[in-house]
Structures are given as C-alpha cells and as structure tokens.
Amino acid sequence: MRHVIALFVATAVFVCLTWEAGAVRPRLEVVGENLVVNGGFEDGGEGWSSVLEISDEGAYEGEHCGVIDNTADGESKWIVQDFIPLKPFTYYRFSMAARRETGDGYVYVHCNWYAAPGERLMSSPQWGAGRAEPVTLRTGEGRGDWRECSGVLRSNRADLGGIQLVIFIRDGADRVYLDDVTIEEIRYPDAPAWELPDAVVYEGHPSRFGMAVEDAVQDGQTFTVTTTGAQYVLDAAAGTMSCRQRIGADREVAVTDLGGPLGELELAYRDAEVCVLQGEDLAIGFQGDSLVTIATNRALAAQVTSDIGAEWFRTQEPYLLAIDGQGGFCVMPWARPELSSPGTTMAPPEQDTGQPGWSASWQVGAREMFALAVFPGREFDWEESFEKRIVCTTVNREARYQIPDEALREYAKYATVHMLFNGIYDQTLAGEPYAAPYNIGDPARLREMIGLGHELGMETILYRAPTTYEPAGLSLDYLLQDLDVSRAYYGFDGWYFDGYLEDWMACYRAMRVVRDQVGDETVYVHCTLNPPARMTELYCPFIDSYATFLLRAEAQFIDGPTDPYLRYVVNTQNISNTIATLKGNEMRAAAGSEDKASMRLQLETMLSLNGRCRWAYPGWPLRESDLEEYVGYYFAELGRMEQQWRATGEPIPMTWPPHGEDR
C-alpha cells in the first residue's frame, strides 16, 4: 500500500510525494488555530453561503453537520466561505470529514487565491492566479461511512491575502455530509543539509539536444565554464561571477555578487551535461543548457547587476526575468517542498530596468537553492522549423468520429507531424476527470493511424496533460515511467503536453528526461500559465528550450500584432530558441481595436516573427478556409521562406513589428 500526501506550492502548484508502506512520513506540526469559521457547523450556516443545509443527525463530531444536496437535479452545487486570511510562504493543512450517499460524480475542495476580501489574486488581467485543490473525491470514494480527507496548501506569492474556500459536487447526483472542516498552519521538519554535489546533478542529457558543457578551465580559484549558450567566469575568492551570452550576441549580460568569498572550491566533476564546483558548504552546477544551480548549506547574499536594458522585465518575488531583443537572463530560486527552510527574499531593482546598470538582490537562506540562467541555451533549428509542419486533428469519441485514411493521406501532402488531440487514459488513473474528453477510446484505431502516418513519413504525437497525474496522487517518477511505457507500447513518436508542472524544478527535471525518451522527435508544449508562479508573462526559458514547439496565449488578450507580449512571450527567438506557435483566440486586429484578428493576420504575424502555425482541425473534404488560409497562403509562404533559407544559408530576418508599424 502507498500513502499519499498532496502538496500545493506557488499559486496552484501540486506536487505529490509518495511513501511506501513502512517508510517514515514527514512529521507535520500544527502551529496555528483553525481559521475556518464554524467548521463544525454547530452554529448553523454562520460563515457559509446559503446553499448549505444543516443536519442534526449522524454528525461526525458534535451535534450538527453540513450537507450539500444535488440529488434532485444533479446540477453542480457548492458552499462557500468567502475569505479566510492566510500568510504567503506558509504551509497550511486543510482537513474535513465527509460522507457520501451515492458516490456519484466528484466532490472537490477549491481554495481560490485572493489578494484581499473580494479581490481575486491575478496572474494577468485575464487569468486568475489559480487555486489549491487539497481534496478531490472521485466517483465512488467516500460513499457510506465518514471519511477523513486532508491536503496541504501553500502560496509563495508575496501579495497573497487569503483564500476563498469552495466545496462542491460536480458531474453527478449525490448528497454529501461534511463536518470538522479545518485550515491550520503547519510546519514541516527542517530541510536537511544538501547532499553535495548530488543536489546540482540531474538526470537527462541536454547535450543530445544541442546544449552542452563545452569547456571548464581552472586557474587558481577562478573558474571559466563555457556552455553552448553562455560563459561563466567565477572568482571564488571574491565571490563574483560574470555571465556572458554566446548565442544571438556575444556579450556580458550580468554580473553576480554572492556576498563575499565562497571558500575554496574544487572542480569536482565535469562531462558534457554538467560541470560541478564543490566547496565545504555549497556546490555549483553549470548545466549544459546554461542554467546555474547553487545548492548552499549556509546563507548567501546575492546581487545581480544587469549589463542590458530589459525591454521585457517581469518579477514575482523571488523570481526575475529580463529580456531584450538579443537574449537575456533569469533568476529562479527554489526550495524543496514539504521541508522547512529559511526561505529566499528578493529586493527588486530601484533603478530604471530599461537601461543597463540596474541591480536586484536576494537573501538566500541556508539549505535553499539559488539559480540563474543566461539564454538562449541553444541555437534555433532552422531545418526543423521548415521540415516539421504540424496538422492537428481529434477523434470525437461520443460522436464516434474517426479520421479517415484518405483524409490523413491528404493532410500528409502538407504536414509532417500529426498532432492527435487525444490520449490514452484507460490504462492509468492519470487524467480522470480532467483528460477524459481527450481519451481516444480505440487503441486499435490509434495503432492504425500511427502506422499509416509512418508510411506517409509523418510523426504522430499524442495529447497528455502532465498536471493530471497530481490529483490522482501519482509521483513525478510515475509520470515519467508512464510516458515512456505508453509511447513504447503504442509506437507513437512524441508528445503534446497540455500544461507544465508548476514546480519549476520538477518541470525542469521532467523535461530533461522526456527529451531523452523522445530523442529528436517532437515535444510540443501548450502553456500560457507558466512556472515558476503560474503567470502569463514570467517564465523559464531554460525549461522551454527542451521543447520542439511552444504554443502560448490561450485566452490571453493580445493588443494587436505589435504587442510586445507576442515578441517576448509567444515568440522564442534568442530566448529559448524553440519553434513558436500562437493560439491567438484573443488576439486583436490592431492595437486598441475591439475586433479579433483574422486567421490570415495571425499567420502573417507569426511568420513575421519566424514562428510557425499548427493547421488546426482541417475539414474533410478540405474546407474553403483550409484551402485559402493554410494550403494557399501559409504552406506556400513557408515553402517560399524555406527556398530563400536554403539558397542563402542565412537566417530569415525577423520583421517584427510587422509592416513597419510602430509599437
């Protein structure tokens, strides 16, 4: 038997850690009182919304319990406690007792992040900052007897004020009894000292994807480490490190001061994937993808001074992203989940970040990790950008719609990657109920399509939502094993990931391993709300660099084709150097316009950025829009650009803003 504890970090981050039977589970110390008003329902409906019913029979504790009843109509129903004050960077345990009559549908607990009463915490003007989901009872779970349920939540948004607590029934008719609802501040055991140098060495081989440690030279206590995308010169005696960009431009982008001498360091290990410097109380890993991770067992005071003026500058304590037209750098501290450590705080720049010379500083606690990266970490793959052309289709399980062989043959005249917006979920807990609509449901037909695609020279990539493993209590290792086994069993080539894991370190580790599994085949990532803080405009280019394609901007307002969001978030050149695609369902025709952009304008805009497009859900027979927008314009223009590139051997110049328009 395995025991599972669910942990939510950042703004909606969910990491599951599993312990085999007999293993020692982390000890949780309750250090605060119950913050839920009338969590035992002894005062009737006080503190709760009006849908709540009160029962005076069969309570779990005391004389009364709460009831949510949707048996009459089967519609979703919920009870709400509007605002419960919480502190940022603090662990809380949610718990409740529940008893279900039918067990039909799902019972969820959602803790929506709020800045203040009535004020939702936001990731962008369009997107709320997410929520924690400490408890999910699936169909059949909790039926009959009372059952205790619990989970842990934490937000590392410094502007957190509290949560809105919502408990509800969905997708089934049930009567749910609730009692003893609590939210209490807890403390985990102190994080142990880092195991050095293992803390900065990770699975995976970035060198197989064009990102490697190329050289490491020691001269006394000065170390020069050269990766594909960067060069770092560390003076351990002074505690300073210069950070130089090598792709897109050859220039210094930042200088890092680590607060004084680091002690004597030795070059402990070096291969194509990582160079490790180790001292008495810290280790520094220079990864092949140009990420630098510093695991420290003592406190550090770090200051980063920028040598670039940032055209795109975003922070969310303690994270920072700085980009100009040629590249940039980011700072991404990290702490181990389900362990207590002093934390890392940031003092943002006081100077104008649009000009070189600005600085930010961090107080890094002992047993924390300080990480920074210069980007891009690899070259843009022009060959791949022309050869890998995506057609996106789906199988409608309810309507029994299948993609005819003759349709796939026609699509293969223009596309080389078949992105099937379906996955295999029947053989795993992962994905229910979130991915159920995407379940292909017919493995035999899937094999036929994969086989035909290979005959036609097409890769097949399948849908998978990495975050669906988390509510099912499945670990990161399980996710990676499941991905590998599924791909080997069915014989498809790569993945379309619908979202990233929100813990940036877990996501980074996963993408390194997935790239090893897939090799040179396609990894397509759709992610508008990005790690490390589930935000639209702050992200980790060193994670993106492991993807072949990125798809961003779903439901994200884009103020016309000159919006800097397109250049510095959707587009990737000189940032991650993946191949950019656009989901422009909220793109406007022009800055300040209320009219949505046509498909032609979206295609033109992406090509002006040297991005690409997925041919989404073509008809069969082909529709007029397929023939005009995709076959007649997009694929024809892509072919013309390819001919130009092959004839000159030079990169295609970016023409953003398009048509010479001002920003």
Image (cartoon, rainbow, N blue to C red):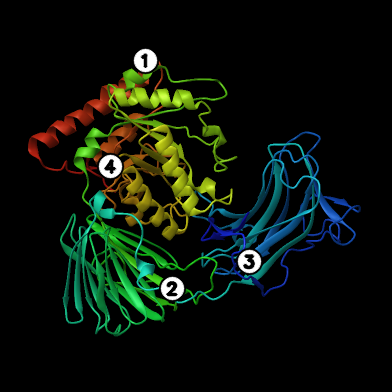
**Comes first in the chain, label 2 or label 4:** 2
Residue 127 visible (yes or no): yes
Between the C-alphas of marks 2 and 4, the distance is 34 Å
Which residue sits at x=18%, y=60%? 246
Q: SS class of the residue under badge 1? A: helix
Q: How dense is the environment of label 1, judged by Cα within 10 Å: few (below 14), some, or many (20 and up)? A: few
Give the left or right position of residue 402, taking residue 419 as reference. right
* Residue 52 rendering spot, x and y as whole percentages: 80, 50
What is the number of the mark on residue 406? 1
40 on left or right of 613? right
Reading the image, the residue beneath label 3 is 92
Residue 660 place in picture, x, y as percent = 22, 42
| Mark 1 or mark 3, earlier in chain | 3
Picture coordinates of residue 301, whole percent (x, y) = 37, 80
What residue is pinned by disc 2? 368
Residue under the image location 57 percent in, 74 percent down: 189
Query: Mark 3: few, some, or many residues within 10 Å (few <14, many ≥20)?
Result: many
Using the numbered discs, state the Cα–Cα distance from disc 4 to disc 1 in whole angstroms: 28 Å
Between discs 4 and 3, the one toward the N terminus: 3
